[in-house]
Structures are given as structure tokens and as C-alpha cells.
Image (cartoon, grey):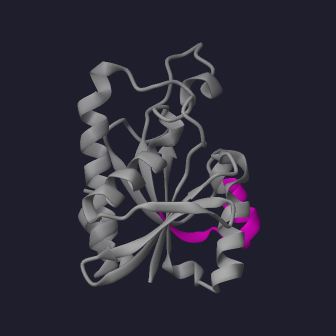
């Protein structure tokens, strides 16, 4: 069973922000496969279902971004799941808007949600789908940028990127992560 963790912040005021592309991707994946998110468990909204014949669990931590690791750890401890079955989906400043980058290990790269997951799991080795949000223009504070909504001119890039990330997650269910990276890192 794969469990896919999308990072974001709870609440309608964060819903359409750059920092919430992880939640956006999980919502799109859930919609594709008729998965609904149930009540909060393990400090997260959890949706369970099938993608083809593969059982998957979609997890949206409700701890706010900087504490995402608390939810991941709570889920791991309660359900006794393996870290190698987890994929984390999140926004990445160093990837151009509209592009995705897959990795299976690495540092947090300044991303506080990933930093929290590394702290709570004790490892940097876990599968990731990084969704590009590009860097802000000079003089624009990063914190304000990631908490801002995508402009209309990026709508198509965003939608295509979400679909591409969903495709990558689906492909990874029946292929190794190395094969998935080779196909989707272009």
C-alpha cells in the first residue's frame, strides 16, 4: 500500500496559494479515482481508496506546513506503515512553474515542511514529487510569495503540472521510483 502525503496549510485563506500545490495535487488525484477525504485522524485529513488495483492512502496534514512531520509520524506509528511506501508532494521554489522534479532523497532545501518530516522520521531518504512554483522577483519576500495565490497567467501551467504530478504518482504504483524518475524528470 502506498501512502501519498501532500503538503499545504489548512483553511480557505491558504487554499489557492503556491504553498498548497501538494493539497491541490491530492485533491485532483482523489477526484480522478473517486476517493473522498474523511474525518481528521493522525492530525490529517485522510482519504483511502484504490488506484487501479493498488490500495492508496492520501494524506493532507492539518498541522500547518512547518509541523507536517508530526502528522507523518503519527500516521506511521498508528498504522505501522513503511517509510519506503510514502511519497511526499510539495511546492519547490527551485523548480520552474509548471514543471515537476522527482527525487528519492535529499536535504530539506529550505522547505520547512520537508525539514519537519526529516526531523520526525530521522531520515532524508523518502520519495518526493516536487512541484515547481519558481522563485519570486527580487525584492519580493519568499514567505509572502509562497502564501500568495497563483496569478491567472499561470493557471494553465498549474493545471498541467497538477495533472503531470498525478500521472507520476499513478505510474509509481506499478514501477520502481527510479523508473518513475526516468520517465517524469524528462
Can the viewer see residue 138 in this picture? yes
Vertical position of residue 112 compared to residue 50: above or below:
above
104 magenta-colored: no
Q: What segment is highlighted magenta in the picture?
A: 115-128
Residue 93 percent across, percent down from the top left:
50, 38
**Height in image: 138 above or below 39?**
above
The quarter of the picture where the C terminus appears is bottom left
Q: Residue 165 at x, y = what percent? A: 33, 55
| The N terminus lies in quadrant | bottom left
Quarter holding residue 11: top right
Q: Which one is in front, 48 or 105?
A: 48
Percent of width and height locating residue 126? 55, 71
Question: Is 127 one of the magenta-colored residues?
Answer: yes
Instruction: Tell me which residue sits at (71%, 70%) in the image.
Output: 73
In which quarter of the view is residue 60 placed? Answer: bottom right
Q: Give the tally of numbered discs.
A: 0
Q: Which of 43 and 145 is in front in this view?
A: 43
Closer to us: 137 or 56: 56
Question: What residue appears at the point 46 percent right and 25 percent down from the top-left corner?
Answer: 149
Placement of 35 over or under 63, stated as above or below: below
Q: Which residue lies furthest to the front in this view?
A: 39
Q: Where is residue 22 in the image (x, y as percent from the top left)?
A: 47, 49
Residue occupying image coordinates x 74% and y 62%: 70
Amino acid at each position: 500500500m502506498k501512502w501519498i502525503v501532500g503538503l499545504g496549510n489548512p483553511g480557505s485563506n491558504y487554499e489557492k496559494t503556491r504553498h498548497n500545490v501538494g493539497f491541490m495535487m491530492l485533491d485532483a488525484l482523489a477526484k480522478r479515482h473517486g476517493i473522498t477525504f474523511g474525518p481528521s485522524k493522525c492530525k490529517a485529513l485522510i482519504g483511502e481508496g484504490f488506484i487501479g488495483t493498488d490500495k492508496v492512502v492520501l494524506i493532507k496534514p492539518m498541522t500547518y506546513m512547518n509541523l507536517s512531520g508530526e502528522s507523518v509520524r503519527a500516521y506511521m506509528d498508528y498504522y505501522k506503515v513503511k517509510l519506503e511506501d510514502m511519497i511526499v508532494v510539495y511546492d519547490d521554489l527551485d523548480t520552474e512553474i509548471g514543471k515537476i522534479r522527482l527525487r528519492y532523497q535529499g536535504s530539506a532545501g529550505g522547505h520547512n515542511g520537508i525539514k519537519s518530516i526529516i526531523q520526525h522520521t530521522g531520515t532524508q531518504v523518502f520519495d518526493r514529487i516536487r512541484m515547481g512554483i519558481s522563485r519570486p522577483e527580487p525584492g519580493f519576500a519568499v514567505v509572502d510569495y509562497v502564501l500568495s495565490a497563483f496569478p491567472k497567467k499561470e493557471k494553465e501551467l498549474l493545471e498541467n503540472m497538477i495533472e503531470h504530478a498525478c500521472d507520476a504518482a499513478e505510474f509509481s504504483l506499478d514501477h520502481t521510483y527510479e523508473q518513475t524518475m526516468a520517465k517524469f524528470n524528462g
